[in-house]
Image: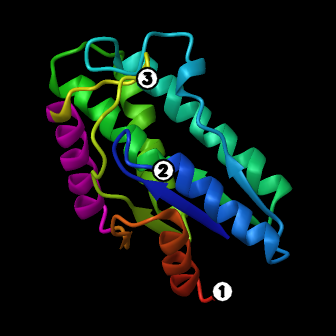
Amino acid sequence: MKIGITGTHCTGKTSLAHALMGTLKERGYNAGITREFVRECPIPAGTEGRNSPTAQAWIIGRQLIEEIEAANSYEMVICDRTVIDNYAYFLWTLRTGMKADPAIVQTVQDILKNWAHSYDYLFKLPIATPLRPDGFRSTDPGWQREINSLIDQIIAERKLQINKIALAPNSQRVAEILKILKLE
């Protein structure tokens, strides 16, 4: 089973993914998580001012690798980020006029087309907490909202079935997810 947790930056994806994995492991499931690796990108990424189609293509490619590797090791894979939110950042770079190699654009579009439906369950997190400087991610709430809107647009265009998870402590969010997964 592959569970995707999607949303714009700073919505609590990583902490929720870890809480869910911990609960599943406590219940005896062979569960694992895909790492958040954007900070490892060798090409500048992470903010609206430090970004490019090439960086986002690298991130999407790495997302695929992480998901494939995790699926080989775990029965239940929790994806901290998905190709959907990664594609939203890629799309944003193109919409702002950044130039991209046409082969990269086509490859990334093909990945979205062929991979977005690979998640057994998708959970979308809302913008919830104030952005806090962490020395890497953007603290511009306008950009956060813009990426969130692009994610919603991709979900609608691809007719993806998502479950929206309300703002709540992670223990409540995990309980809600377990009900949806029919594992309560």
**Disc 3 target residue:** 134
Q: Quadrant of the C terminus?
A: bottom right
| Secondary structure of the residue carrying numbered label 1 | loop
At 38% from the left and 69% from the top, the residue drawn is: 165
Name the quadrant containing residue 24.
bottom right
Disc 3 to disc 1, how far (Cα)?
35 Å
**Residue where numbered disc 2 is placed:** 13
Q: Give the range drawn in magenta.
A: 142-159
- Height in image: 3 above or below 81? below
Q: Earlier in the sequence, mark 3 or mark 2?
A: 2
Q: Where is residue 120 in the image (x, y as percent from the top left)?
A: 56, 71
The quadrant of the rendering that contains the N terminus is bottom right
In front of the other: label 3 or label 1? 3
The residue beneath circle 1 is 183
The quarter of the picture where residue 26 lies is bottom right
Q: Which of the two residues, 113 or 167, is positioned nearer the viewer here?
A: 167
